[in-house]
Image: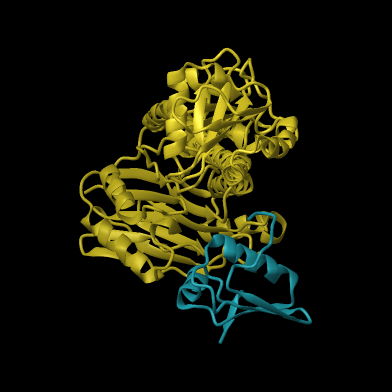
Chain colours: A cyan, B yellow
Amino acid sequence: MEGVTHEPSGTTIERSSGRVAFVLSGLTFMDSSGIAMLLRVTEQVESLRVRDPSVSVQMVIRATGLSDVLRVES
Amino acid sequence: MSVPVAVRSVEDPVQESAAEGVDSGVDAAGNAFRRRRGSLQVSVVIVVVIGLLITSVLSLGALALHNSNENRLLRQRVREAGAVITAAVPTIRTPLASAAVLAESTGGNVKLFRGLMEPIVKIGSPFISASLWSTKTGTRRPMAVVGSQPTLASEPSAAIDKVLERAKSSSTVTINNLLAARNRRLGYAFVLPSPTAGFMVYGEAALPRDRRANVERNDAFADLGYALYIGRRADPRFLLASSTGGDVLHGRTASVTVPFGDAQLHVVMTPHKELGGPLLANLWWMLALLGVVITAGAGLLVSRLTSRRTDAEALALENARLYAQQRTVAQTLQHSLLAEAFPQIGGLEFAASYVAGVEGIDIGGDWYDVVRLDGGNILLVVGDVSGRGLEAATMMASLRYAARAYAAENHPPGVILSKLSALVSIARDGHFATVLCGMLDVANGRIRVANAGHPEPLLIGASGAEFIATSVGVPVGVHVDDPYPEVEFAFSRGSTLLLYTDGAIERRGEHLDIGLQRLKDVSLGAVGTLDAILTQVAEGVVGAQAEDDTALLGIRWKE
């Protein structure tokens, strides 16, 4: 995982002028490697949104204090 | 399988039992390996046996087929020969019958008889001698002779009478066996089948002196040896002629008996070469050879494949051993990084547990730390670097020792975390870390906690177990923030504080709430020393297939 960027399976990325939305509707579980990947993208783009995350993924984002960084939208 | 490495409040030696467990597993597999070797021979033997069996069956089948085919063809040829011989009978009968008719109707005119017979006898076939006799009993000499003298004339009177009688009573040609005579002849006698017949026409054919009569090269029967007997059986006394001069009773033979005048001719034939052609004749041993070659090839292939598989299994075994070895090394390393003595402080009890995740041969990024600071405060840290491997371990070490350094400079937990966050960055280092940092003020019995994205600690007291509500900041490495907000709570006698990493509450496919509740329940139910409690908690919350590492740190203030 380290040094290699890959999308967690079940996700798609939409790009438009530096604003990135991760559609995570297909993702049921995300561990620290997944969060790390999202965070690395956050560093490189204007804004990042997480669209339609599952309840589990939402809880992980909230528990890790990243609700303001990985903004959730439905 | 996770190998719990529990750390007590005094140093203890690196656990050897883990390594032993690995080796005994490898030994058991080694025995299995030796058994496989034996089965290599057995399977090759089986393949070879089956191959040879099939080959024999096919080969013998081809041989049997060939034999039956040859016999069939030979019988066919023999029947043909019999038919040829039968077709030859008229060539004997016709001239005799014609001469008999002539004789009866001309009253035995010798001149006419001669005229009829001379051309035939001149050819020499079918007779070399033709004679006209009177049928009166007592006749001793022929009336006329064409060609060579008939042997019959020199026979005793009884013999002549016998022939006359037989010819008179037979409607076909009477065969006179003169094989015993000096010049080996066969006599053919014919009398018209009329009660008043007065004449017998008699011809004699010469049989080869050496009894040998070779068939011409382009004859239909050139590829066969034959023996011709008079009578029904292959009696050597009655051998008329043969291709060899003697019997041909050896090897493959077939025979047929055909009527010949009032006698029989017995033909025995033997093939000089394979009637069915060389292919079928040789097929049996060609099949045998092919079968043996294929069987040998199959045996070799099976042996090769089996030994390849054995090799592959041996390789897999070796790999498993090396893997287990490296895992043990990684765990020993992890253990050594974390196994430092807890501070000895009156009234306080410390314990920790580290459970490695499945699959992990790489060192993980979880850590815990308890440091006694000048002034009597205790620094409590638990952290979790994302991912695994050398980079994660390096960041973990940096953060761990940096935290101790910042704490030694008397910074509060919130400031420590913000300084740690300035130390690393996810963009540059590729990892982040969740960290919970606490400061225990022993004198006042209070703990201040700051939280960088880490699960909240569990406080177990007389009234039960509750998670401490903290203000959860972003993980270390995400932003450089102002000091992280702090929360303060009372830590009284008899209570236990449990710090942990997310391996204790997180399971794939499960809501976080369930994991949190489980930790709570197991912690409440655990009894005994702090060590025992942590062991029970570790066993109770870490899943059998947990991929993530789990670190537990417990602090108890004794009653």
The residue that appears at 64% across and 47% down in the rendered structure is: B391
Q: Nearer the viewer, residue B360 or B85?
A: B85
* Residue B72 position (above or below residue A57): above
Determine the image quadrant of residue B114: top right
Q: Nearer the viewer, residue B185 or B153?
A: B153
Determine the image quadrant of residue B81: top right
* Residue B335 position (above or below residue B479): above
Say which quadrant the N terminus of chain B sits in: top left
* Residue B4 position (above or below residue B16): below
**Position of residue B205 measured from the top left corner of the image (x, y, whole percent):** 62, 27
Left or right placement of residue B521 versus residue B473 in this view: left
Q: Nearer the viewer, residue B202 or B452?
A: B202
**Position of residue B169 measured from the top left corner of the image (x, y, whole percent):** 42, 39
Left or right placement of residue B127 versus residue B229 in this view: right
Left or right placement of residue B382 versus residue A51 in this view: left
* Residue B38 position (above or below residue B480): above
Q: Does the image show residue B271?
A: no
**Position of residue B276 measured from the top left corner of the image (x, y, whole percent):** 62, 39
Q: Residue furthest top?
A: B182
Q: Residue furthest right?
A: A17
